[in-house]
Amino acid sequence: MIENEIQVLGTSHKKKNRFRPVWWSIVVVITVVLIASAIYRLGRLEKTYVSTINSGLQMGVDSLLREKMFELNALSGQAIVMDVKSGEVKALVGISRRDGALQVDENVFGIQQESGMVQGVSFMAALASRNVHLTDSVDTKDGVLTIEGITIKDHNWYRGGYQTISVEQALHVSSNIGIYESVKRAFGKGQGYFDMLKKMSYGMPDSIEGISGLKKGNFLSPKERSWDDTYLAWSCIGYDHAIVPIQMLTFYNAIANDGKMVKPRIYEGDIEVINPQIADSASIKAMQYTLEGVVSHGLGKLASSGFTKAAGTTGTFQIYSSEDEGLPNIYSVEFCGYFPADAPKYSIIVNMIKPGYPASGGGMAGPVFREIVDYIVKEQN
Amino acid sequence: MKKQIIISSTNELVRVQPERIVYISSDGNYSTMVLHDQLEHLFTMNLAHVQQELEKQLGEKAQMFIRIGKSLIINRNYIYKINVGKQQLVLSDMVLPQAFTLSASKEALKQLKQLLEDEIK
């Protein structure tokens, strides 16, 4: 518009009309920018969502897990296979019993629970403190330990317990007392154990694209409630922890990966490092050695494959007590490990929730682990 | 009594009802105020200064005046005829028989004409 020749006195020199083209051009520019960024983001979306899951393996794992769950009358189960170095998830199977039948259920991945696998985590923490060594001795006595009126028992307490064993053996045989004594020796009685769990990024990741309902694994610590010696004892063997199998797998995968914790992914993309080194490499090596021992000498014998050397550890935990109600207690039975032990390629976790005794991570989840390992080895040859 | 405005310089003060002002024209440093009964007065101030005084003292009522170009302020109530082609602006009282014919640029008259036409829309 041409500079105005006339002006009504008392009004501003710029008339309203002159604003409109400027206004409109701003609106147009903003709209163009918004559309351009939306197209750019859509373009990236196209690339991102390619699944890492191997459909043949997924089907194979599903059928192996389902078979065992049926045999145990299990209430729910999960089996997850992860590529050690990249974090790509190759199989992600979740099954639960609904209306009497075993059905695929993706909701199970986010359900937090206590876990017997915490024993291995505590063991790793104790080694990482540098105050405990595999050859140290721990006295598990008769398998019964009383702390301030609270009793901790090893699973073979009625057979007289394990008495004095090496620290390494404590994990081989899943001795609660052995683990507790190791943690106590490593950290004293206070916050140190919990700080180490945080330092190792235990409980991560708190979200995975494509898996809904995930929350960060957590645990009660002295900071949160009035401290009492017995809490350390309960916590280091798994009580008051809330974690899900894929987070537990992430932790053990870091051990397989020489200390580097990578994030599990179900979509193709870049490797995401959660923690470049969860513990010093000497402690990691000691842990790897112990995990091999669990399979070769310990309660994980049923997990050992005829085709390759595997390493891992077992977990058995009573997650729900309903005997008072006349119902069987509920147990979680787990095995988490990796293979080949000398140059880990895949890590696997098998978790099942079953009613009533007997319950054994090594005896029940261990065989499923072995079958998955054998399946993968055969498929690759 | 109707509101009067006061235009004051160092030596002089003029007091007038704004309704009586038909137009004020200027050539540089002097401004000539013409009232409807043809009374004229010369101020020793430029048009911008006169405009300021009108705006200051009349507030909203200043809108009865329209500045045209750089040298003319007219009282819109006296607009009788606009002829863009002839570049003529005729201001008249409707009461007194005389009319004042002024000239202005084609563009200014075009815009003035547009302004009046927009107002009745």
Image (spheres, grey):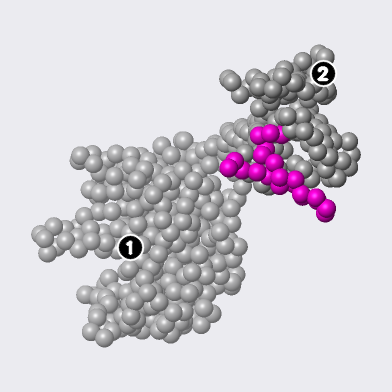
Q: Which mark is residue A114?
A: 1
Measured as percent of width and height from the top left, residue A219 is found at 38, 68
Image vertical order of residue B48 relative to residue A230, above or below: above
In front: A68, or A116? A116
Of A262 and B40, nearer the camera is B40
Q: Give whichever of A87, A174 is nearer the camera.
A: A87
Q: Secondary structure at mark 1?
A: loop
User: Can residue B115 be found in the magenta stretch?
Assistant: no
Name the residue: 77% across, 43% down. B50
- In this picture, which residue range is highlighted in magenta? B1-22
Position of residue B63 in the picture relative to residue A88 (left or right)? right
Residue at 76%, 49% (x, y): give it: B13
Residue B18 lies in the magenta-colored region: yes
- Where is residue B82? Give x, y as percent: 74, 18
- Furthest residue to the top? B85
In the rendered image of this protein, does residue A263 appear above or below residue B14?
below
* Location of residue A296 in the rendering, given as x and y in whole percent from the top left corner: 44, 63
Decide if residue A38 is in sight here: yes
> Which chain is home to disc 2?
B
Q: For residue A267, which numbered disc appears in the image? A: none
Position above or below: A52 against A288? above
Quadrant (top left/top right/bottom left/bottom right) for the C terminus of chain A? top right
Query: Which chain is mark 1 on?
Result: A
Say which quarter of the image contains residue B29: top right
Whether labels 2 and 1 belong to a single chain: the reply is no
Front position in the image: A321 or B14: B14
Q: Amino acid at mark 2?
A: Gln
How many residues crowd mark 1 within 10 Å: few (<14), some (14–19), many (20+)? many
Looking at the rendered structure, the number of numbered marks drawn on it comes to 2
* Residue indicated by mark 2: B87
In the image: residue B55, left or right of residue A104: right
